[in-house]
Image (cartoon, rainbow, N blue to C red):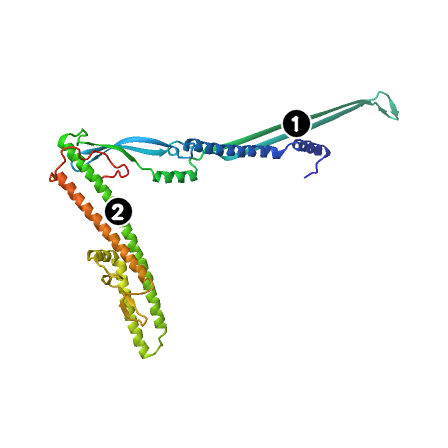
Amino acid sequence: MEPATGGQKGVFMAIAEQFAGLQMDQLIGAPLRAAADASNQLANSTAEFINRVGFDANGNVQTVAFGYQRRSVNEDGTSNLDEMKVNVPMLAIVPIPNLQVDEVNILFDMEVKQSEKQESSMDMGATVSGTLNLGIVKVSVTGNISTHQSNTRSSDNSAKYHVDVRATNHGIPEGLARVLDMMAANVAPTLVGSSLKDGNGQDLSGQAKLKAERLKGIRQEISQIENRLGAARDGLDNSIRQMKRLGATQLNAFQGRMMKLMNDLEKDNEEDDKTAAAYSQAMDEVNQSWNAFQNQAPDMIRLLVDSNDQSDGVSELLGLRGLSDMGEAEKYSGGDCYQAFVSAQRNSMTAQANVNTIEKELFDKKAEYSDVIAGRAALPESGGYDGSVDTEDPEEY
């Protein structure tokens, strides 16, 4: 490659001078700062929208009430026309503006073209008039001199600056979506009012109306009893689980005692071998009794209540066995968890008795319902069930 000539160096210097005045930090940084400011404004716009639309002046969630009618058919051929209402959070039904700047592209092109062309030419001629005698040679000279030179220089500068910003709506923010999910989980229709109709949706009258009102009242009583029964059974399950946990702890204590007794025996000793066999048999008896309790605890508690067991300690009907300090199986009458187990047994029996009472109440109420449908129960001549409902318990039997 040939080294640059003086003229070429001058061209390069001229091109370099075109870039010397450019502030690249401004060309690139300015649009990026503008995009960051735009993102901040968009985030503030989203937050302002959520506060303005989603919450009232007191910070409570703003809701929209939707009302509708729900019709259900009863076993006696009548139907209920229920007026229902549901409150839905405003933020769950309106689109939330959540624009975000996704991409910023900056394109800067600058093209500098500079060329120089130099042309020169020289024509020479001479004309001399005269005579020169050189012996036998005669010389005649004619001369003509002319010169021509031209220089051409051209330059072309162009620049292109393009900023491309892309922003899209990202929908509901993740945190707000989780909050709305929690709200939606607690949104349930509310019963505002209810009226009885015949099978065709027409108003009832006379005895048919009295019968339908009576049946509706019983259905609501049954629903309330079933709710109480569900809560009572949950309490019973908790009490029984507590007994099982205490039983497992007590069994572990007996097994630890047995392990200590086993470790005190000598190996290869005939008498101790017999003792170890007796220990194992006793421990098997203890394990079987407690494992049986773990598998049959609900039935055992029901047996204690049905038999009206009045034991001060752990009932013998449970068949639980303990382990003495001598490694012998015995009636479970003491141990690390004994008093706590006795207390849990009493709680379970009380919970089971409560469940039994409510189950009988439910059985009687369903029998009353069947009697009214079959016409075996007398109806009040007037008044009776007034058609009102307990809005806290809209479910029906």
Name the spot of residue 149 as percent of width and height, x first: 74, 24
Task: State the residue at coordinates (26%, 47%).
Answer: 230
Numbered disc 2: secondary structure: helix
Name the spot of residue 337 as percent of width and height, x first: 33, 62
C-alpha span from label 1 to label 2: 93 Å
Name the spot of residue 291 as percent of width and height, x first: 28, 62
Q: Which residue is mark 2?
A: 230
The circle drawn on residue 274 is none
Numbered disc 1: secondary structure: strand
Task: State the residue at coordinates (40%, 39%).
Answer: 179
Check disc 2: other Cα within 10 Å, few if <14, some if 14-19, many if 20+.
some
In the rendered structure, the answer to whether residue 104 lies left or right of residue 263 reads: right
In the rendered structure, the answer to whether residue 370 lies left or right of residue 121 reads: left
Asked where in the image residue 70 lies, by quadrant, the reply is top left
Q: Depth check: 275 or 203 in front?
A: 203
**Which three-letter amino acid code belongs to the residue tagged 1?**
Ser
Q: Depth check: 160 or 243 in front?
A: 243
Q: Are marks 1 and 2 in contact (CB under 8 Å)?
A: no
